[in-house]
Image: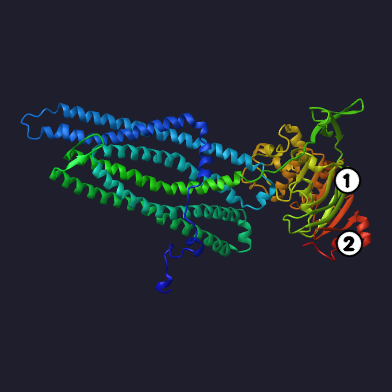
């Protein structure tokens, strides 16, 4: 590689980033951040008081140097028997001032730690609560690692700003104002020199900080991207190794890591130069004031201050030099904290983007209740009777009617697409009568799972109608609709907790006996009892200590505990060996008895006894009927069953 090819990260900066406008403080985002601090108003007032006292104590100590030199030290020079009592009292007074400042500094730092953690707790609570209301589509289009980054990197950037930056900025501003007033009280001429020099500092600092802020915002996004990639690779590590994809995975990681590294490098390249630049300019100002002040003092030039006119003394120059350091220092700190503000703004923008995501809408008003018949009338009851009813409130007269849940589900000429420009289901007609077992078969991507997602209202249809016991499912509250549907998925999700906790997931009030009975029904009782603590064995890492088949059996038992009126089995036995499947199938048949059941299966032996089998191809139902009927027609199903054509 030639010398001209070797470029620093700044030189490698993409063209589109060179043209990107500099970082600017977003007032709306800052307003929202401060909105979360309102519950801590009392603590913040106390913090402000401590900051003001601490800053004033620091400035007063610097200002006291003039009095100390001019009134206590200079009079003692050349005296034969000096009396140091006055000087000692002055020194004790300075020590007291410093102690007050230290106590107040410790106090506001401790209080801000409590405030920042309280604010972050509330933000995390709101994020997690809002996340539960988001539609499935959101999680289908965002990586899990990127979502996790909201709770870690982005909230940590906010923590740093709230706990450190805000109090430091406030302390610096108070110090700047009080120091400026003190400088005016000593010498207006020297103060004008400081003011002129500030213009140069602000111009330089503003240019550097705006560039740094732009790259800090990019850094937060790159951090979310790389977290998403790492999470994906960890979850798929077995697949990576099976297909010897390590080098490709590493190459993909390197690409994202280089992007993060360059963004980080660019951000810190500008950020790290701020403090040295400010310090150097502060030293230059210090020298200028010392030279000018010394010349004025030696020549006995007239000095104009806010409240007096006289000669500039040595004590005044010494005090002013100390004040100039106290003045430049906070300005440097404020400019340095702009980096923290930029990171916090980037994190807050991502967090508020999540919080502003539209929640899943639910206009339903029909609810699911336990019911029983009294004198031939269907009535609501608090206890579980294994009889359910749809409760219809009527706003006109305030009356309520009940419709027995029978499991009659109809899809009438349904069209659907995940995006408006691409329809994946076309003219779907399904008539599932109460107690029927309806099976969907077809190649991967034919639309089988999509149909069940529409019944659950994970997505809303583009055209057509879906009715549940004659009720348009749009009128049924989503929680109640989903409570009536038991789902066993091909991809099993177990949660950290005991086996018993996982079995109770769909019915928290289930007794141990009900859970054990459900496990026996699904043929899971045997292996569960062989676990170290039986039903009290703690599962972690999505049940990583269990085989795929065992995890699936627990999932089936979990659905059995919930005991829903309608079941959806999406490849529910795909991870179970043939022998176990035959045993489980008998238990599943008992579980499915009297219920409407939708079955998705590649293994056609599991759907032979279905009342209706529907064959899908590219989002269309091309055949329907019983096993015997479809075999006699010798169509697509016949080819699949006889092996003339295999599912992909």
Residue drawn at x 19%, y 45% as measured from the top left = 293
Question: Residue beneath label 1, please?
Answer: 436
Identify the image quadrant of the C terminus: bottom right
Mark 2, residue position: 638
| Residue 27 left/right relative to 137 | left
As measured in the structure, the alpha-carbon distance from the residue carrying label 1 to the one carrying label 2 is 22 Å
Decide if residue 282 is on the left or right side of residue 88: right
Q: Residue at x 82, y 44 (%)?
A: 588
Residue nearer the viewer, 183 or 23: 183
Expressed as whole percent of the image width and height from the top left, the position of residue 575 reads 74, 52
Total labels: the figure holds: 2
Q: Which quadrant of the figure has residue 46?
A: top left
Q: Dot 1: what SS?
A: loop
Q: In the rendered image, which quarter contains the N terminus?
A: bottom left
Label 2 residue SS:
helix
Q: In this rendering, does residue 134 appear at all? A: yes
Q: Dot 2, how many residues are within 10 Å of its Cα: few (below 14), some (14-19), or many (20+)?
A: some
Of residue 371 and residue 78, the one placed in the foreground of this image is 78
Residue 361 in the image, given as x and y percentages of width and height: 71, 42
Q: Quadrant of residue 515?
A: top right
Task: Provide residue 328's location: percent of width, then percent of height.
Answer: 31, 45
Frontmost of labels 1 and 2 is 1
The residue drawn where x is 26% and y is 34% is 61
Asked if residue 496 can be seen in this view, the reply is: no
> Label 1: few (<14), some or many (≥20) within 10 Å?
many
């Amino acid at each position: 590689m030639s010398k001209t090819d070797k470029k620093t990260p700044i030189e490698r900066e993409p063209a589109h980033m060179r043209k990107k406008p500099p970082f600017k403080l977003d007032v709306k985002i800052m307003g929202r951040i401060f909105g979360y601090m309102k519950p801590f108003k009392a603590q913040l007032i106390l913090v402000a008081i401590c900051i003001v006292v601490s800053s004033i104590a620091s400035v007063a100590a610097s200002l006291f140097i003039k009095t100390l030199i001019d009134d206590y030290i200079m009079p003692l020079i050349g005296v034969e028997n000096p009396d140091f009592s006055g000087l000692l009292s002055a020194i004790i007074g300075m020590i007291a001032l410093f102690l007050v400042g230290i106590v107040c500094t410790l106090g506001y730092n401790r209080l801000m730690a409590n405030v920042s953690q309280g604010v972050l707790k509330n933000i995390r609570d709101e994020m997690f609560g809002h996340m539960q209301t988001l539609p499935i589509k959101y999680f289908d289009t965002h990586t899990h690692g990127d979502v996790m980054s909201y709770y870690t990197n982005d909230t940590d950037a906010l923590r740093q700003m709230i706990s450190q930056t805000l109090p430091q900025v406030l302390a610096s501003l108070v110090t700047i104002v009080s120091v400026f007033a003190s400088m005016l009280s000593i010498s207006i001429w020297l103060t004008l020199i400081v003011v002129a020099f500030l213009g140069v500092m602000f111009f330089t600092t503003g240019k550097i900080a705006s560039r740094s802020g732009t790259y800090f915002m990019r850094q937060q996004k790159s951090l979310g991207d790389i977290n998403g990639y790492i999470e994906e690779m960890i979850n798929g590590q077995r697949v990576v190794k099976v297909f010897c994809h390590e080098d490709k995975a590493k190459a993909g990681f390197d690409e994202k890591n280089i992007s993060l590294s360059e963004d980080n490098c660019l951000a810190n390249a500008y950020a790290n130069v701020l403090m040295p630049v400010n310090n150097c300019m502060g030293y230059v100002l210090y020298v200028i004031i010392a030279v000018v002040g010394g010349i004025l003092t030696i020549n006995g030039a007239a000095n104009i201050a806010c409240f007096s006119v006289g000669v500039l003394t040595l004590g005044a120059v010494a005090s002013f030099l100390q004040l100039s350091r106290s003045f430049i220092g906070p300005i440097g700190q404020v400019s340095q904290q702009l980096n923290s503000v930029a990171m916090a703004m980037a994190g807050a923008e991502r967090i508020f983007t999540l919080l502003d995501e539209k929640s899943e809408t639910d206009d339903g008003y029909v609810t699911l209740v336990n019911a029983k018949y009294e004198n031939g009338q269907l009535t609501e009851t608090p206890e579980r009777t294994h009889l359910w009813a749809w409760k219809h409130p009527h706003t006109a007269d305030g009356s309520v009617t009940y419709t027995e849940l029978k499991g009659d589900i109809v899809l009438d000429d349904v069209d659907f697409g995940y995006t408006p420009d691409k329809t994946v289901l076309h003219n779907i007609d399904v008539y599932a009568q109460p107690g029927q077992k309806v099976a969907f078969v077809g190649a991967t991507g034919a639309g089988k799972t999509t149909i069940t997602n529409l019944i659950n209202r994970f997505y809303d249809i583009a055209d057509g109608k879906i009715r549940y016991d004659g009720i348009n499912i749009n009128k049924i509250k989503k929680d109640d609709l989903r409570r009536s549907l038991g789902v066993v998925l091909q991809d099993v999700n177990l949660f950290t907790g005991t086996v018993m906790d996982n079995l109770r997931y769909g019915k928290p009030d289930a007794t141990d006996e009900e859970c054990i009975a459900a496990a026996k029904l699904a043929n899971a009782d045997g292996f569960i009892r062989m676990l170290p603590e039986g039903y009290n064995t703690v599962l972690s890492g999505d049940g990583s200590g269990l085989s795929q088949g065992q995890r699936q059996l627990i999932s089936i038992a979990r659905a059995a505990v919930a005991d829903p009126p309608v079941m959806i089995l999406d490849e529910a036995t795909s991870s179970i060996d043939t022998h176990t499947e035959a045993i489980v199938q008998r238990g599943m048949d008992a579980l499915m008895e009297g219920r409407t059941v939708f079955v998705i299966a590649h293994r056609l032996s599991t759907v032979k006894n279905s009342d209706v089998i529907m064959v899908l191809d590219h989002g269309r139902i091309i055949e329907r009927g019983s096993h015997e009927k479809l075999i006699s027609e010798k169509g697509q199903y016949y080819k699949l069953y006889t092996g003339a054509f295999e599912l992909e």
